Amino acid sequence: MKALIIYDDFAVTVKAHAALQHSARYSDVGVQWNIRLGQVNMFKCPLAAETALTEAIDTHLIVFVGRCAQSPPSWLEHWLEHWTKCRQIEDAGLAVYCEGSSDALSLELSQFATRPGLNVLFDGETTNSSFPIEDGPSVFAGGPACVKQ
C-alpha cells in the first residue's frame, strides 16, 4: 500500500514513518507500506505540486505531520482538493500524526474527510480495516469522528 507523508518537521516525520512501519509488522492484514515524503513547501510550487499529485494518485493514505495538519496553507488545501478528485483509490484515508493533542486535525482537513470514500484514521482505528494501527500507543489522531460517506 502507498502512503504519502506531508510534513513540515522532519524529526517528527521519522516517527510517523516508523509508526506506519510498526503498523505493518504488527497487523493481521500483512500490509507492506511504500512510503513517500513530501515537504509541505513543495506544494507551493505548481510544477512540484503537479508531480506530487501524479505520484499520489494511487495513494492509500495521506499522513499530515506537524503544523500543516493544524492550519494547512492554502496551496496545500488546493492540492488536496485536486487529489480528492483525481485519486484512484476509492477508500483512501487521511491521517494526522501528532505527539500530543488528539485535536490536531484542522477543520479544513476534517471537511475533506467528509468526501465520499475518504476515511480518517484516529486513535488507532478507522472505518476501513485496511489501515490498522495496533499494539502500542495511539499515535494517529483525527477530527471529532471517524467519517466515511
Image (cartoon, rainbow, N blue to C red):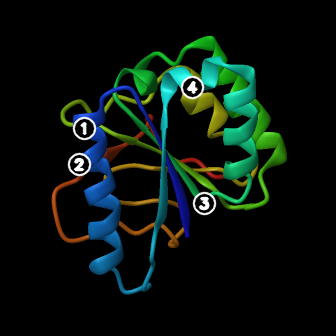
Asked if the residue at tag 4 contacts the one at tag 2, i.e. Cβ–Cβ closer than 8 Å, the answer is: no
Label 2 SS: helix
Residues under labels 1 and 2: Cα distance? 5 Å
Dividing the picture into quadrants, the one containing residue 84 is: top right
The residue identified by callout 1 is: 12
Precedes in sequence: disc 2 or disc 4: 2
Name the amino acid, label 4.
Met
The residue identified by callout 3 is: 60
Asked if the residue at tag 2 contacts the one at tag 3, i.e. Cβ–Cβ closer than 8 Å, the answer is: no
Front residue of 48 and 149: 48
Residues under labels 3 and 2: Cα distance? 19 Å
In the displayed structure, does residue 10 sit left or right of residue 80? left
Q: Residue at x 37, y 86 (%)?
A: 28
Precedes in sequence: disc 3 or disc 2: 2
Asked if the residue at tag 2 contacts the one at tag 1, i.e. Cβ–Cβ closer than 8 Å, the answer is: yes
Judged by depth in the image, the label closer to the viewer, 1 or 4, is 4
Residues under labels 1 and 4: Cα distance? 18 Å
Label 1 SS: helix
Disc ID at residue 42:
4
Dividing the picture into quadrants, the one containing residue 89 is: bottom right
Badge 3: few (under 14), some or many (20 or more) residues near its Cα, within 10 Å? many
Q: Residue at x 24, y 30 (%)?
A: 101
Judged by depth in the image, the label closer to the viewer, 2 or 4, is 4
Disc ID at residue 54:
none
Name the amino acid, label 1.
Val
Disc ID at residue 15:
2
